Amino acid sequence: MIIKERIFKSWLAQKHKQISAPDKYVKVITTLSNHLKKNNISQTDLFLIDSPSESRKLKELYFENSELLQKNIKGNRMYSRAFDLYIEFLNDTYESESITDDIINIYNESQDSETEKQNLILSRIGQGKYRKKLIEYWRCCSVTKYPEVPLLIASHIKPWKKSNNFEKLDVFNGLLLIPNIDKVFDNGLITFKNDGTIITSVLFNNPWELGINTDMKIELNEDHKPYLEYHRDCVFKK
């Protein structure tokens, strides 16, 4: 099961406790993806989509197809229910604005120079000077010490959308992470204490299946701590 599917299953188990078999809805989302592909509506798996608005649009297109509409009715509206739950999940778990929207906002609203705008844009998409600064600082995964830098993700501690321009480019507001840890950290399923000890959310079932254990610890500078305090207070799912 991919990371997104695990997170969706955990979210269902905590947010909708009346659902006795969360696995069933995970499978239905995969079925919906196959229907979308087969009917040439979308070639992208739903579990690869983070945008609630994009998922809502796909739901509209799905039920414009009379054959798929009838499938839903015959199946006691299981497909529409699964769509609604997935969209709710995205609204709860992911930022609704896309990277594209953020880049447009930088150009339209920022009073910075073109160079500063470019640095902010590259920071938003995880490239440029900011990523290089994180690589120079950490040199490997901040948590596991995995050394293959091309595979690591430049991750903000205090989310990019909530940071001011200084914080967006501050090396102490960033971690260099392997993809599985980046995903769960970004979604508030893990965080770190000021001494670097990992904390896992009650929503995170079986973290060891993703290679995450309670012995993990990160070496922190004092300047990381205010950002981690924000992450614990505002991002971490307690």
Image (tube, rainbow, N blue to C red):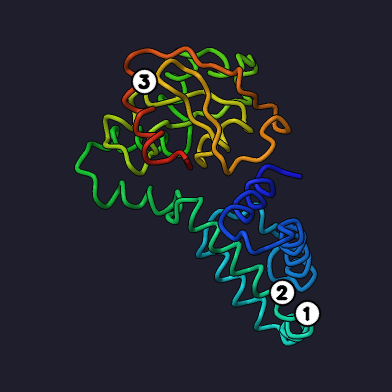
Residue position for label 1:
75
Would you say 147 lies left or right of 169 here?
Answer: right
Q: Relative to 40, does residue 72 appear above or below in the rendering?
A: below
Q: Earlier in the sequence, mark 2 or mark 3?
A: 2
Residue position for label 2:
78
Q: For mark 1, does the 10 Å Cα neighbourhood hold few (<14), some (14 to 19), or many (20 or more) residues?
A: few
Going 61% across and 22% down the picture, which residue do you hit?
214
Would you say 194 lies left or right of 60 here?
Answer: left
Q: Amino acid at mark 3?
A: His
Q: Amino acid at mark 1?
A: Gly
Q: Quadrant of the N terminus?
A: top right
Q: Secondary structure at mark 3?
A: helix
Would you say 236 lies left or right of 161 here?
Answer: right
Q: CA distance from mark 1 to mark 3?
A: 51 Å
Q: Relative to 213, does residue 17 appear above or below in the rendering?
A: below
Of 21 and 4, nearer the camera is 21
Q: Amino acid at mark 2?
A: Met
Q: For mark 3, does the 10 Å Cα neighbourhood hold few (<14), some (14 to 19), or many (20 or more) residues?
A: many
The image quadrant of residue 116 is top left
Q: Secondary structure at mark 1?
A: loop
Q: Position of residue 235 (x, y in %)?
A: 42, 40
Of 35 and 40, nearer the camera is 35
Going 73% across and 87% down the picture, which residue do you hit?
66
Q: Are marks 1 and 2 in contact (CB under 8 Å)?
A: yes
Select label 2 or label 3 by which is in front: 2
Q: Position of residue 62 (x, y in %)?
A: 67, 76
The image quadrant of residue 44 is bottom right
